Amino acid sequence: MAGGSDLLDRRERVVLAEDLAGVAEGTSGEVMLHTGITWLRYWVRFDSGAERGSIHRDKLVREAEWEDFLVKRAEAEAAAEVAAESGGELGSGSGDQPAAEVDDGASEDVVVNGATLPAHLLARSASARERLGG
């Protein structure tokens, strides 16, 4: 998750972690309000003058945490790239994981934008795509 699960307060300074219609990633702004009870969304007035609502917390990062977020995202992307490149080596019996423990060619968990995608879900998605011809 980009910004974490902690709530943002009204008037808190944030940075957009993902492009939105008419607002570029990296644009700073101020939280105007949050709405919802269990499904929270934020309304933000950006420094560019744009106002957007219904923004999920994972698309907003506190200004003070922006640099750390960029570093963590770059590390996660690099790790995902390494995992994708080493995907053909899994099950060879080398490394820490014996070949017997590899589940039908399923790769290791992959981290994307700070969120871990479990290998069994990735394998399930690949299997569904094959079944559906996509």
Image (cartoon, rainbow, N blue to C red):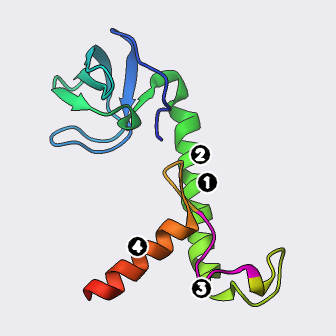
Residue under the image location 25 percent in, 22 percent down:
44
Residue 64: x, y in percent? Answer: 53, 22
Q: Amino acid at mark 4?
A: Ser
In the image, what residue occupies the spot 63% across and 80% down? Answer: 103
Q: Nearer the viewer, mark 1 or mark 3?
A: 3
Distance (Cα) linking label 3 and label 2: 28 Å
**Distance (Cα) linking label 3 and label 4:** 13 Å
Tell me the residue that label 3 is attached to.
105
Residue drawn at the location 54% of the way across and 69% of the way down: 120
Q: Earlier in the sequence, mark 3 or mark 4?
A: 3
Using the numbered discs, state the Cα–Cα distance from disc 2 to disc 1 in whole angstroms: 5 Å
How far across and how far down the image is residue 39, in percent? Answer: 30, 29
Query: What is the CA distance from the residue labelled 2 to the residue labelled 4?
Result: 26 Å
Report the residue marked by disc 4.
Answer: 125
State which mark lies toward you, 2 or 4.
4
Mark with earlier residue (1, 4): 1
Mark 4 secondary-structure assignment = helix
Where are the magenta residues, as a range? 101-109
Whether residue 37 is visible: yes
So how many labels did they put on this image?
4
Tag of residue 72: 2
Q: Secondary structure at mark 2?
A: helix
What residue appears at the point 49 percent right and 75 percent down from the top-left corner? 123
Q: Quadrant of residue 33?
A: top left
Q: Which residue is mark 1?
A: 75
Q: Nearer the viewer, residue 57 or 37?
A: 37
For residue 134, which quarter of the picture? Answer: bottom left
Residue type (three-letter) at the residue carrying disc 2: Lys
Q: Amino acid at mark 1?
A: Glu
Would you say the residues marked 1 and 4 are in contact, meaning their CB atoms lie under 8 Å apart? no
